[in-house]
Amino acid sequence: MINWLFRDRTTGRITIAQFPNLSIGLFLALTVTRSLTSPKGVAGDVLDAATGAALAWWSIDEIVRGANPFRRILGGTVLTWIVVNLVQRLS
């Protein structure tokens, strides 16, 4: 089970974490910016939307191109969390 879950299908190595790609790097940078500046109003809303979009981009990329089932499940879990939070905010 561990072998199936964590083995990279292209390299054959066990892969749990990888060097951050552009989408997760952008998410992290936006999160740090949000916490350091705490903008209000439209600027805060735009920053929140950009942060959510970057995380959604990462999660969809993991679902589609994840190195192994663990990464794909992680992407699906994060995308589900994003959708649930979005529905709660809109309700």
Image: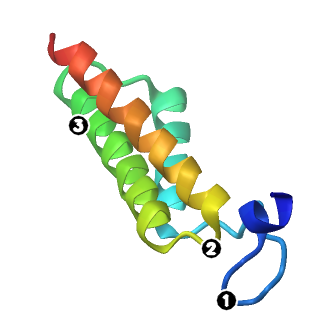
Nearer the observer, 42 or 19 = 19
Which residue lies under the disc numbered 1? Answer: 10
Residue 51 horizontal side relative to residue 74, left or right: left
Q: Earlier in the sequence, mark 1 or mark 3?
A: 1
- Secondary structure, mark 3, is helix
Label 1 to label 3: alpha-carbon separation: 38 Å
Nearer the observer, 69 or 65 = 69
Residue 3 horizontal side relative to residue 66, left or right: right
- The three-letter amino acid code for the residue at tag 3 is Val
The residue that appears at 36% across and 49% down in the rendered structure is 56
* Residue 48: % across, % down: 32, 33
Q: Disc 2, disc 1: CB below 8 Å? A: yes
* Residue 60: % across, % down: 38, 59
Q: In which quadrant of the rendered image does the C terminus lie?
A: top left
- Secondary structure, mark 2, is loop
Q: Disc 1, disc 3: CB below 8 Å? A: no
Label 2 to label 3: alpha-carbon separation: 31 Å
In the drawing, what numbered circle is on residue 67?
A: 2
Quick one: label 3, few (<14), some, or many (20+) residues within 10 Å?
Answer: few
In the drawing, what numbered circle is on residue 46?
A: 3
- The three-letter amino acid code for the residue at tag 1 is Thr
Quick one: label 1, few (<14), some, or many (20+) residues within 10 Å?
Answer: few
